[in-house]
Each structure stands twice: as structure tokens, then as C-alpha cells.
Image (cartoon, rainbow, N blue to C red):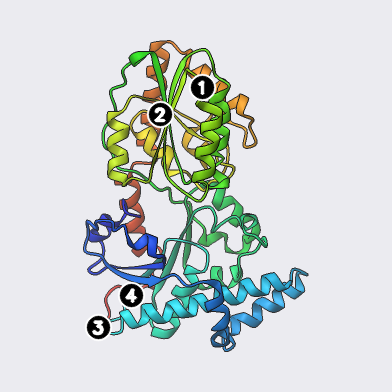
Amino acid sequence: METEEPFYNDVFDKVWIASLQLRSEHARTKRNLKGKSVVIPVAYKKRIFYLLNAMTVLVDSNLYRELLFLIKEKRFSMSRLVDLFVYLSRAHHEARIVDKALRNECKNGIVIYSYRFEYQPYVAMLLKEKWGTNNKIISRAHRYDIYEEQHKNDYIPLRYQVLNGIDCVYPCSEHGSNYINKRYHSFNAKIETKYLGTKDRGIRNYKFNANDVYEVVSCSTLTKVKRVDLIIDALASIDDFKIKWTHYGDGELMPEIEKYAKDKLEPKENITYNFIGNVSNDILMEEYKRSNYFAFINVSSSEGIPVSIMEAMSFGIPCIATDVGGTSEIMGKSEYLLDSNCSYKQVSNSIRKMASLSKSDYVDLCLNARLKWNSMFNADTNYMDFVKSLLEKDDSFEKDTNC
């Protein structure tokens, strides 16, 4: 969204960004807004807060519609009931905060855009109801907010009500669109894939076999779904050439991953590694352009459509990745697209295969990566098209009415 935000200036007179579920650790890092956006911070609250305030949602008719749906589908359980109350209580609480922040603003002509497709579009629906205006509501959709089996109880509340109440959902991959269409086929007309994109920062100048070391890079949060331990196992199985691995990103598994890397990789004389942690996107992009990364590796068990791969390919860095979510839409029919449940040996074999390429074949691989990115995931093209579509989709939407 940081990349997308400047494009709002070309279409909208005013922009507000309601930063929902803002944790204290998030607030320590501020992104520089390049447009005219004003941020509305909405603080994170624990689930117990929303459960204690659940009385406020007893007047919401969608609570009872959803309960009847769960009972009819034989999906009712106490854990799903808790999820439903937290969902509704959170949405009502955050809608009140956003409404208060915009109390002096004219509500006509506001497009309400949700970047996520979980409870956030319901916040938009509540705001539209409070304001009594003909606001257009649209939502992007990514991974966790699409694939219901990624949730503990295989459940995201109020799917039918949300799809019925908003104007359009834009999944970031065809894989995501197909998933929603299959489950909620009566709303197919509202589903349209809109790819994300990354900035064009130029192509790197790769130095072949610099210091006889193949440098590989990965970038992700350190969580279970990212399977960074699989990268460690793959590297540990390579003995026939020198490798330097750099990982960008932090997360809850950082101590565990660092220990695992120390145990598996430090005994090997041909491998060095470095955990950089979190850096700003600008710094990361400069590193991609400056450093001599031979390949980018992503072995996630689940993805929406990975921006990390788009970023790497924009510099002409070839990728080795698992075929999950929309990854194949970025990489195409690449021989370096691995099975979703691949073993560490398959990962290490792909690294070896890429390292064995001739100079000309490797250059072709780099150029093809760059061309694929430019044709499908260039931010200048994708985000301008997306922002314009916010006003074009609904003919009944009134942009300017007495404001």
C-alpha cells in the first residue's frame, strides 16, 4: 500500500488512511506518505476487550443471520461463536473511531476502500449505514483474508453479508479470485483480479562468480508458514560450491530460526549466512540493486501473491519458489517453480541447477524475470489502472454532491 498511496492524488481530493489494529511496535516505525493522505490511527485491542463489549452488537441483525446460517450448515460451534462476536464487536468499535475522526467532513462522494477482506469491509458497511450516503465500498483481498482454511476454525464470519453489501472485491491473484468464485458463485460479477505491483528501480548489474561465491537471498516474516527452516536444510545439503545466504525480515520464530541455522550451517565451511532483520523497503530495494544476489528463494506453504518475488524479479533476480497461491502467475511455467510440499532436496537441487547454467543461459533467465515483471507487475501501470477503477465501476456512484 505504501507504493500505491501516491497514485491516489490523481483521482481524489482528500485521502484518509484508517490504520486499523495498530500495535505499539507498529507505531515505532512511521512510513513517509508521498501523497496528501491523513492517517487515522486505530489502536489494537485484545480479543477479551471485544468480548467484554459484545453487548454492543446484539442490535446488529447480521449477528442473527449468521447464527442461523451456521446452524443451518451444521457449522455452529462455541469457538466460531466467539469468532463472530469478536469480529462484530471489533468492526463496530473501529467504525465508531473512524466516524468520530471524520465527523466534520462531508460524507457524500467518499469511496470506502478496504485493503483487507476480513472484518475491515464490514467496518466500511457500518460507516455507510451511519452516514446514510451512497458510498461505494471496494476491497482488495490477499491470502489470510481469502483462504478460510488458514484460520483456526476454518471460518471467516459474515462472508455472504459482506459480499452482498459491498460493490467489488479485487483479489490480488487469479488463484484467489477462483477460490472466492467457487465458494460464493452468486457474487461472481463482483470479483475481479487486480494485481499488485512494485516500483521500477532499474536492473542490477550481476557480477558472475564474484569471489567464487553464489549469493542467495530471501525476504519474509519468520513465521511457520514461511518455512525458512526448509531453506536452511537445503543449504546444509550443498557441499560442492560456496554459498552466502542473506535473509531480510523478522518475526516470532527469529530465536528458533537463528539457533537452527547455527546448528546446521556453522559447521559447514562452504556456507556463510546473515540475518539482517527488518529494514525499510527503500533500503531493501537498494540492497537488491547493489548486492550480487544470484537467486531469490521463497518456500512458503501459503501465499496470496508474493510481492517479495515481484520485487526480486524487477531487478532481474531469478526466483526459486513453491507453487502456492498466485506464485505461478508471477513465475509462469518455470522449472524453478517447486511443488507446494517440496522437500529440502528439491530446493537444493534447484539451486544447483541454476548454478550450473552457462553465462548466456543465466543472463536469459535474468532478462526473462525482468520482462515478466514489467509486463504484469509494474506499479506505474497496475496502480494507476486500479485507482481509476475505483470511480469507474459503479455508474450510480455520485462523486460530488453538495461538498
* Tags 2 and 1 touching, CB below 8 Å: no
Residue located beneath label 1 in the image: 351
Between discs 3 and 2, the one toward the N terminus: 2
Image quadrant where one finds the N terminus: bottom left
Amino acid identity at mark 3: Asn
Amino acid identity at mark 2: Ala
In percent of the image, x 33 and y 31: which residue is there? 315
In the image, which disc is placed on residue 402?
A: 3
* Tags 3 and 2 touching, CB below 8 Å: no
> To which quarter of the image does residue 158 belong?
bottom right
In the image, which disc is placed on residue 369?
A: 2
Amino acid identity at mark 4: Glu
Q: CA distance from mark 4 to mark 2?
A: 42 Å
Which secondary structure, mark 1? Answer: helix
> To which quarter of the image does residue 395 belong?
bottom left
Instruction: Please identify, in this view, whether the residue under mark 1 or under mark 4 is nearer the observer.
Output: 1
In percent of the image, x 55 and y 19: which residue is there? 238
Q: CA distance from mark 1 to mark 3?
A: 61 Å
Amino acid identity at mark 1: Ile
Instruction: Please identify, in this view, whether the residue under mark 1 or under mark 3 is nearer the observer.
Output: 1
In percent of the image, x 59 and y 42: which residue is there? 301
Between discs 4 and 2, the one toward the N terminus: 2
Q: CA distance from mark 3 to mark 4?
A: 10 Å
